[in-house]
Amino acid sequence: MHRHASVTSAGIAVRTAYDRGSVNGAVATPYTSGVNQLRCTHCGTVGLEPGYVEDTGRASFGFARWVPGFLQRNGFGVAKASGRPRWQLDAFRCPKCAHLELFAANPL
């Protein structure tokens, strides 16, 4: 397992562990060392719960990804994203107000 720290677009350091032995390649799982100091931008509560946004659609990998640019669809209504980079979404939920903070810090 390889570990490194990355910084989200909001300037928050997120430590990430990559398990290269997973079925779908490198899967990153966010974690923080010690006490979680992430602060909710909605109500100010400290200590957000880490998680991810699940994607259960056809041919999905089980997790949502962020793709730069505006959504474009082909003639069948399917999103056109070929050739564009994809980023893992790290989600953190506030235990007080249920607000979600999403970060796209790790390229896939």
Image (tube, rainbow, N blue to C red):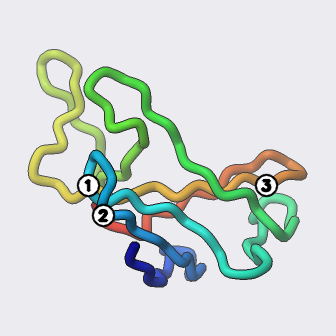
Up/down of 93 relative to 54, above or below: below
Q: CA distance from mark 2 to mark 3?
A: 30 Å
Q: CA distance from mark 1 to mark 3?
A: 30 Å
Q: Which is more N-terminal, label 1 or label 2? A: 2
The quadrant of the picture occupied by the N terminus is: bottom left
Indicate which disc residue 20 carries: 2
Could you tell me which secondary element the residue under label 2 belongs to? Answer: loop
Residue at mark 1: 25
Q: Residue drawn 79% across and 45% down?
A: 98
User: Given this view, does label 1 or label 3 mark the residue nearer the observer?
Assistant: 1
Residue at mark 3: 94
Up/down of 24 relative to 19, above or below: above
Q: Position of residue 27 (x, y in %)?
A: 37, 57
Q: CA distance from mark 2 to mark 1?
A: 6 Å
Q: Amino acid at mark 3?
A: Cys
Q: Residue drawn 87% across and 65% down?
A: 45
Up/down of 106 relative to 72, above or below: below
Q: Amino acid at mark 1?
A: Gly
Q: Amino acid at mark 2?
A: Arg
Could you tell me which secondary element the residue under label 3 belongs to? Answer: loop
Is 78 on the left or on the right of 33, as rendered? Answer: left
